[in-house]
Amino acid sequence: MRIDVVTIFPEYLAPLDLSLIGKAREDGLLTVTAHDLRDFTHDRHRTVDDTPYGGGAGMVMKPQPWAEALDHVVAQGDGSGGRRPRLVVPGPGGAPFTQSLARELAEEPWLAFACGRYEGIDERVYEYARDDLGLEVSVVSLGDYVLNGGEVAVLAMVEAIARLLPGVIGNAESLVEESHEDGLLEYPIYTKPKVWNGRSVPDVLLSGNHSAIAAWRHEQRLARTASRRPDLLHPAQVTTDGDLEVDLRPAVPADVPELFTLTKACWVQEAVANDRLDIPPLHESIEELRASLDETRTWVARSGGRLVGSVRTSVRGDDLFISRLMVAPDLQGLGLGRRLLALAEEAASSGTRSFSLLAGALSADNLRMYRKAGYRPVPGEPPAPGAVELVKRRRG
Ligand code: JD8
């Protein structure tokens, strides 16, 4: 990738000589060339700014030096089949710079950045770049705060883009689980010693049980995202205290198709966690599911119109058997499972003396949630292979 940066402070880009980006430039994975805008002035004072038409505070950057600077940059591509750079102009009013935009720009063979200063750049420079030079021009903002110029933004954007280029980050694998890569924030990380300052590393991370570690990390990412960046989760479906905004109601036949799909999604997850396929929900037909609505009580949870959870109960004497407790995999860890379980218990008839359910013996998160809810394993042979029967006496 080729990167050109036009600025009145070329020395501002020195940090790009360092660390991984500096190494990547040495290795020829990308080039970064700074151009001093003042080199494209012709007066003794190398003037790049003047007063704003219409009055107002501050100064505006003059169009002519910019036009000549951009002409010069574009001319670097002469002889390369008319290739032209994509021009990125940082500005507080621009489109938000995000990881997805960084990924998009990392696909470009040639980027040019125009760093403004003062109050900004004469508007006709944007038109000249688009219409006369035929460049794709993107005005991009680093964030909702005001800087004194575009240079800091370019430093951040170039780092976020260049580190996505093949070969720049040693182990590309580490790019996968980063914050903003899949819309979730990163999980907590730890290194030696196991106990530091009286604080221990979470046991699960020392367990060697990779699916449990993966599950814990996913749960941590969801919980962090819900508390720190609920806006990153499903739009407007997270209440201020991080809970998922859902409406819980009895299931109706119209829910069956979505319920069937959600059931498969959730029990494939269970099958993977428990490494077995002989789990009834996996083999249930949509007709059997539809019929179950008449034989049992089923509730569904909808958020933003999407069916995101469900639970089913069936009376067995004075015991209420709770089953098919499910939450959409991408929304687990936000407390919806706990709320569906509470709903099923609250809806129990007065004659109910206990609640019971089955859980996958290796479903660590579910078992932890049931334990927190007061359920305890029933000793003896499990009623189904690979499952644990849990029971809770009804209080009051
Ligand atoms: C480019 C001039 C300063 C901005 C008067 C202060 C980006 N997230 C961001 N915040 N600020 C910028 C940014 C600020 C710039 C320039 C980017 C060129 N200024 C101006 C308008 C108000 N001064 C930015 N990306």
Image (cartoon, helix red, strand yellow):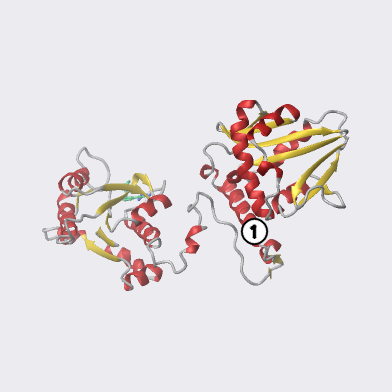
Residue 243 seen by the camera: no
Q: Residue at 81% x, 31% y: name it.
A: 348
Residue 21 falls in which quadrant of the image?
bottom left
Tag 1: amino acid: Ser
Quarter that holds the N terminus? bottom left
Q: Is residue 261 visible?
A: yes
Query: Quick one: SS at disc 1?
Result: helix
Q: So how many labels did they put on this image? A: 1
Q: Is residue 223 left or right of residue 77?
A: right
Please state if 115 lies on the left or on the right of 213 as rendered: left
Q: Nearer the viewer, residue 126 or 223?
A: 223
Q: Is residue 388 above or below residue 55?
A: below
Between 370 and 87, the one nearer to me in the picture: 370
- Give the percent coordinates (x, y) of residue 254: 60, 26
Q: Quadrant of residue 55?
A: top left
Residue at horizontal 28 percent and vertical 55 percent from the top: 115
Give the residue drawn at x 32%, y 70%.
25
Rendering coords of residue 308 (x, y %):
61, 37
Location of residue 7 (image quadrant): bottom left
Which of the two residues, 329 or 126, is positioned nearer the viewer here? 329
Quarter of the image with the C terminus is: top right
Q: x, y percentage for residue 71?
A: 15, 55
Q: Which residue is mark 1?
A: 211
Q: Does ligand 1 reach within 8 Å of label 1's beta carbon? A: no
* Whole-percent x, y for residue 95 in the image: 36, 44
Residue in the picture at 47% in, 60% down: 175
| 220 lies above or below 341 | below
